[in-house]
Image: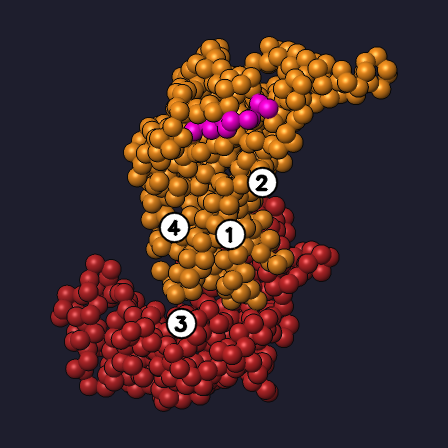
């Protein structure tokens, strides 16, 4: 497969802060590539540079052979962008929004009208097309937001955390639509901090943290980095601080790493069944109430924990 | 170019879907005009025009029929409240009074003025036209406009008399009813009679005759309506500029900038949007006040040109404000302050002519002052040629402010605060 996107040592600095630190990767035509990382890892900055919103401090990227630095207009014609935040005119109807954005991509006349009808069907809003966007639910707005990015049938679609803050039903619909678009031949760069989404959608995954691309490959390749290790996941009572438990279990023999996100303690270990009892005992000693315990086989969460010592949703 | 208009039309549509903006753009100026009109007695038969006792200096070196008639016109009862004429003998002293801001204009009626128009019986006309000289105070454009209009009216009556005499004589000689040697005497008598008849019928007052011959009366609303329209135009342009910052924070601006649209197209489109919204606002207010209050704005073509340039000048301020401010809230706050300050500087609330020189010069930074100057002149019966100064000032203002705004945007970038 040929690469539609290739980044070379892409760097973005804001004064003293390095948001993206020399990342290099490629995306192959027809694949779904996920950029997985916690909030503030540099995912949106990377997409902003790739979509020519602002130039990199150094390095370059090529989309369809065009440099984002030197040929931004050629790049913009090849890409579609679904931004993380809703970027719509809420006082316009869905159809009016699609008309305006379609015109910005050079569509007009009958071809624009036909394409809008197709997209409205695709996002399931054909019957609500003449209603102002401000009256829509959050999920419906997200769907229009995606529809705008699809109008001109881009070769490469950037989707920046499109499921943040929406209900499970709308999230399911969006994930299905991403798979559907990919089946139609569209290449997708999908950023997320949800491990499950990256696992469900991606052909390949890049894991990004603090501006560094710390891992890259297929899910099987990444999981191999964890080896035979499992993850013991403990959900503690919401009134209690999981951090205390995470610190305490790190001293238990067989525990490789332990970290906490919200009220979930993730423990990386090669002997999940063996250490489960001492971990629960330790929780009892600390007076903590365990609501549930899961043993997860190697996954991207475990990969992130292995590589950074931190849980993904930090 | 097409994208510029598409962005502009989108902004126009959004502006007219914003109920709060509509109230400020259309209802507020309309109601304020109505309220102030009621206060000044416009709707109860009152005659106050808001412009009164304009100091005018007359230097009559002609001392003959027409020179004296012009002086009498300025001293007539009809213009008693409007102008405050003073006779001067010393031209330099009169001009100095104007320079010192103690008079709106000095009118020099040179020697031979009457004879250059009406030949003395038994003498051949000199053939040389002697012109009246008007020395004006540039800091009092509205008052100067009034004085010029009175002069125009007087001169048109003189012209009516002269042309009337010529036509009468030509017809009488052609029909053989008089001999050619009687032509001068009869022509002079006929012309004088026609001129005096005209004077009796439409004696010089602030009732001007337009080029179409339709009588128009200066109306307090002709001062208030443009004044309010210009003031709320400043709201519209600052609100329009604010939308650029709102689009930035709401993500539609970055989205535009990752589409095949350049930042120049985006900025130009926003400017067109603000411009179209301002034009729509002004034209709706003009048509509204014309229909509802029977207000005469003057020559429609000239009014349209003035509206175009007044909006252009105001848009320059809107863009500059947007380029300086960092948040939509800042634009709102500064924009509201600017709207009020410019409203005052424009002369809609206070008589700026009675203010110190520095104040009157300061008013020139506002599109309101220039706009109001032009609108008043047109309402008094002036034409496009009478408002060239405000038109030029507004054009230069818009161009200059737009250039500064573009420089600031270039330095900072469209997507950063």
Contact, mark 1 vs mark 4 (Cβ under 8 Å): no
Q: Distance of mark 4 from mark 3, alpha carbons?
A: 29 Å
Q: Could you confirm whether marks 4 and 3 are on the same chain?
A: no
For marks 4 and 2, the one nearer the N-term is 2
Residue named by callout 3: A45
Mark 3 Cα-neighbour bin, 10 Å: few <14, some 14–19, many ≥20:
many
Q: Earlier in the sequence, mark 1 or mark 4?
A: 1
Chain hosting mark 3: A
Residue name at image x 61 percent, y 59 percent:
B1
The picture's colour for chain A is red
Q: For mark 2, what is the residue? A: B305
Depicted A290 relative to depicted A70: above or below:
above
The percent position of residue B292, horizontal first and vertical second, equals 56, 21
Residue B39 in sight here: yes
Among the 4 quarters of the image, the one containing residue B265: bottom right
Q: Are marks 4 and 2 in contact (CB under 8 Å)?
A: no
Host chain of mark 4: B
* Chain B visual colour: orange
Task: List the single residue furthest toward the front.
Answer: B122
> Label 2, label 1: how many angstroms apart (C-alpha)?
18 Å
Q: Chain of mark 2?
A: B
Foreground tag (4 vs 3): 4
Left or right, A263 with respect to B16, comes to: left
């Amino acid at each position: 497969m040929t690469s539609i996107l290739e980044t070379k040592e892409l760097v973005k600095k804001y004064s003293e802060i390095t948001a993206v630190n020399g990342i290099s990767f490629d995306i192959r035509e027809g694949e779904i590539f996920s950029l997985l990382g916690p909030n503030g890892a540099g995912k949106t900055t990377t997409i902003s540079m790739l979509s020519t919103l602002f130039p990199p401090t150094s390095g370059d990227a090529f989309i369809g052979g065009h440099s984002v630095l030197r040929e931004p207009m050629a790049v913009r014609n090849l890409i579609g962008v679904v931004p993380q935040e809703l970027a719509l005119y809420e006082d316009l109807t869905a159809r009016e929004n699609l008309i305006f954005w379609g015109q910005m991509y050079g569509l007009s006349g009958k071809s624009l009208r036909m394409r809008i009808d197709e997209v409205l069907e695709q996002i399931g809003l054909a019957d609500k097309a003449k209603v102002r966007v401000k009256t829509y639910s959050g999920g419906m707005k997200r769907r229009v937001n995606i529809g705008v990015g699809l109008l001109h049938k881009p070769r490469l679609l950037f989707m920046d955390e499109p499921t943040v803050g929406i209900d499970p039903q709308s999230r399911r619909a969006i994930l299905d639509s991403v798979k559907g678009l990919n089946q139609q031949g569209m290449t997708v760069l999908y950023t997320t901090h949800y491990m499950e989404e990256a696992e469900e959608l991606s052909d390949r995954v890049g894991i990004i943290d603090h501006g560094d691309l710390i891992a890259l490959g297929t899910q099987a390749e990444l999981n191999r980095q964890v080896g035979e290790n499992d993850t013991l996941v403990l959900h503690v009572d919401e009134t209690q601080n999981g951090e205390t438990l995470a610190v305490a279990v790190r001293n238990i023999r067989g525990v490789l790493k332990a970290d906490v996100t919200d009220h979930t303690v993730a423990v990386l270990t090669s002997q999940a069944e063996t250490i489960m009892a001492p971990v629960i005992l330790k929780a009892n000693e600390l007076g903590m109430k365990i609501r549930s315990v899961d043993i997860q086989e190697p996954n991207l969460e475990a990969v992130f924990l292995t590589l950074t010592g931190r849980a993904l949703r930090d | 170019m097409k994208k510029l208009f598409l962005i502009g039309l989108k902004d126009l549509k959004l502006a007219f879907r914003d109920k709060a903006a509509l109230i400020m753009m259309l209802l507020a100026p309309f109601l304020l005009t109505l309220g102030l009109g009621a206060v000044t007695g416009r709707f109860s038969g009152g005659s106050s025009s808001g412009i009164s006792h304009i100091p005018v200096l007359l230097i009559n070196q002609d001392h003959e029929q027409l020179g004296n008639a012009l002086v009498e016109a300025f001293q007539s009862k009809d213009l008693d409240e409007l102008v405050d004429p003073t006779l001067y003998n010393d031209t330099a002293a009169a001009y100095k009074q104007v320079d010192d801001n103690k008079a709106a204009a000095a009118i020099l009626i040179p020697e031979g003025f009457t004879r250059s128009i009406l030949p003395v019986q038994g003498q051949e006309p000199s053939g040389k036209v002697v012109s009246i000289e008007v020395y004006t105070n540039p800091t009092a454009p509205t008052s100067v406009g009034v004085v010029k209009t009175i002069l125009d009216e007087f001169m048109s009556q003189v012209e009516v008399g002269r042309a009337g005499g010529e036509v009468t004589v030509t017809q009488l000689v052609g029909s053989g009813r008089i001999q050619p040697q009687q032509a001068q005497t009869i022509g002079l008598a006929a012309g004088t009679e026609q001129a005096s008849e005209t004077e009796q019928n439409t004696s010089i007052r602030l009732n001007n005759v337009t080029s179409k011959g339709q009588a128009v009366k200066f109306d307090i609303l002709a001062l208030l309506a443009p004044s309010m329209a210009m003031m709320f135009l400043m709201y519209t342009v600052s609100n329009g500029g604010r939308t650029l910052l709102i689009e930035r924070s709401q993500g539609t601006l970055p989205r535009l900038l990752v589409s095949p649209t350049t930042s120049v197209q985006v900025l130009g489109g926003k400017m067109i949007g603000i411009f179209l919204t301002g034009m729509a606002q002004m034209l709706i207010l003009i048509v509204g006040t014309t229909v509802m209050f029977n207000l005469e704005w003057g020559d429609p073509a000239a009014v349209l040109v003035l509206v175009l340039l007044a909006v252009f000048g105001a848009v320059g301020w809107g863009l500059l404000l947007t380029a300086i401010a960092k948040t939509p809230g800042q634009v709102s706050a500064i924009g509201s302050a600017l709207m009020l300050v410019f409203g005052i500087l424009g002369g809609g609330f206070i008589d700026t002519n009675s203010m110190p020189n520095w104040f009157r010069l300061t008013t020139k930074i506002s599109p309101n002052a220039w706009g109001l100057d032009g609108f008043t002149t047109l309402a008094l019966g002036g034409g496009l040629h009478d408002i060239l100064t405000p038109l030029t000032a507004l054009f230069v203002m818009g161009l200059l402010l737009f250039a500064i705004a573009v420089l600031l945007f270039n330095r900072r970038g469209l997507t950063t605060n």
